[in-house]
Image (cartoon, rainbow, N blue to C red):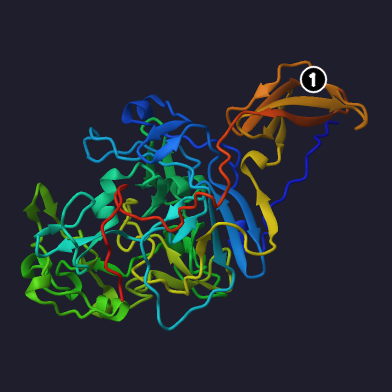
Amino acid sequence: MLFICIPLHCYPALGDPLISSWYTQKSGQYARIFEDKESMLAGQSVVTWNRGQGIQNQPVYAGVQEIAHSSEWLYIKTTGLGFHTMGPWYFDEAKTQAFGNFPANTASIYRFPRKVLIPQDKSSTSAGVIGYFVDGIAMFDSTDTFSYDTSQGVDQTPVSAANGDGVWNRDAYINEGVTFDNANAHQAGSLHHYHANPPALRYALEDSVQFDAGSNAYIEKFNGNHSPIIGWVRDGLPIYGPYGFDDPKPGSDDMKVRRMVSGYQLRDGSNGSSDLTQTGRKSLPKWVEHLDGRSTTITSAEFGPAVDARIDGETYTLGRYFEDYTYKGDLGLTLGTDFDLNEYNVRFTRTPEYPEGTWAYFTCIHENGTPTFPYNISTRYFAQPEGEGITEYPEPVTIAFTGGPDASEKNRSIALEDDVVVITWSVVEGGTYRIDTSNDLEAWDELPQEPYLADQTSWVMLYSRSELDRKRFFKINRISLEGYDDTEFGSSNNAGGPGGGGLPPGPRPPRP
């Protein structure tokens, strides 16, 4: 008989999804990037790098490093870097112009309210972090913070002299998508973030995404299952992947799952919408009035550029701006029949985590996985946005999870395969390990083998059955840990950092 000595490990309480849904399975793994397309195709990633504001002179552990809570708040500590290999990033489709910044450790602390308040008056989203995905990567809203400047006849950009009017507001996925890596992420300064559907995270969560390692590509393939929670918005509501129950009613035994349909569509003449290609950008959709408090009637000084106009080498296609979309409910279509998500991009629905029902955001995609407006959230939070970045815990907390360099090593599995005993340990990358054995849990002997330097988070040991005594205990020992980026959490917090193109944006007119 074979026994494994397993150290105690603190797992999040399963009763509260806000505590238990964070992706910690690979805690203890270094963050990695592909610096360019050549290294990506060769499968050669690096754990230290330097470009623009993104400087990592030492390896840094990826993702969420600690989860804590009080009765009122849930806290995470995160480096803001993904478990998947990030990058590469370019400014152009041909991938010849390197993006201005690499990501870096933000050493952020962020807190979310455990009690959700749903006010009548909704708050506007703003530039910077509006929540976090469960892999510890920052969530930004759907804008790149820039807008059209009528007086200049061009868009405001990080490098233009134009000042946006705040009337025709640019869509980040459409305008900045070329700078995203295959995981749909890029940087504002050194702050790594998602604006839209995160396929690499969804792949890790086994949510209807396949991965082609040779091309570093993620492919949407519906597996029939309800999407998991992929993130949390600062108002305390979860955001799910794109697939939910067809029948949202609590208590229903209908388990049919399908892709959730966005409540927005282009103003292309379909379903009775205005056709901006024919009329020009000379009016605003009704949602700007009931969401943002703006008039739908604008003067000639506020008209947008003609659809498909060619300006400074760019084509101003339909969909470039938020205001190119209309809410389907304003066209006479029916929420719950013709589409699933309301103007805030939420739905009240039962989910696997909330069988009695919850308000929840869903990430919006087309059938092929391409993100579609409003992506994760529209221009307003549905609930009260009380979450925020902080520099330290302001109150006594209960620690629910500790990871990164402080993760507890443990046995992951043991199996007998063709008379070979296969023992898999969960370890911390950069740690050096030895194994001690015992027959009685009192006297321990070191196994006569070289210490193991972990270059990943799994250590697989193989023993022939004949090598093992009838009863043997194993104990894993970390004997050293290589140097790593140990920036104190909260000291370089970027929770209020700017958005937009990896370069500091110009002023963004606040929404009412």
Query: Which residue is the site of mark 1?
Result: 447
Residue at the location (42% across, 63% down)? 362
* Quadrant occupied by the N terminus: top right
Q: Residue 80 placed where, x, y %? A: 49, 47
| Residue type at the position of mark 1 | Leu
Q: Which residue is drawn at 61% across and 41% down?
A: 404
Lateral position of residue 5 relative to residue 96, left or right:
right
Front in this rendered view, residue 401 or 357:
401
State the residue lying farthest toward the front.
491
Q: What residue is rendered at 58% in x and 64% in y? A: 353
Disc 1: CA contacts within 10 A as few (<14), some (14-19) or many (>=20): few
Left or right? Give the position of 228 relative to 407. left
Q: In which quarter of the image is the C terminus?
A: bottom left
Coordinates of residue 438 in the picture (x, y in percent): 88, 27
Tell me where residue 185 appears, x and y as whole percent: 37, 47
* 343 relative to 139, above or below: below
Which residue occupies 20% across, 69% down?
167
* 192 vs 437: above or below: below
Q: In which quarter of the image is residue 172?
A: bottom left
Image-quadrant location for residue 485: top right
Q: In this view, does 114 lie to the left or right of 451?
A: left
Helix, strand or loop under label 1: loop
Quarter assignment of residue 289 = bottom left
Q: Nearest the camera: 122 or 229?
A: 122
Asked whether residue 103 appears in the rendered view, the answer is yes
Give coordinates of residue 238: x percent, y percent: 50, 64
500 left or right of 11 in image = left
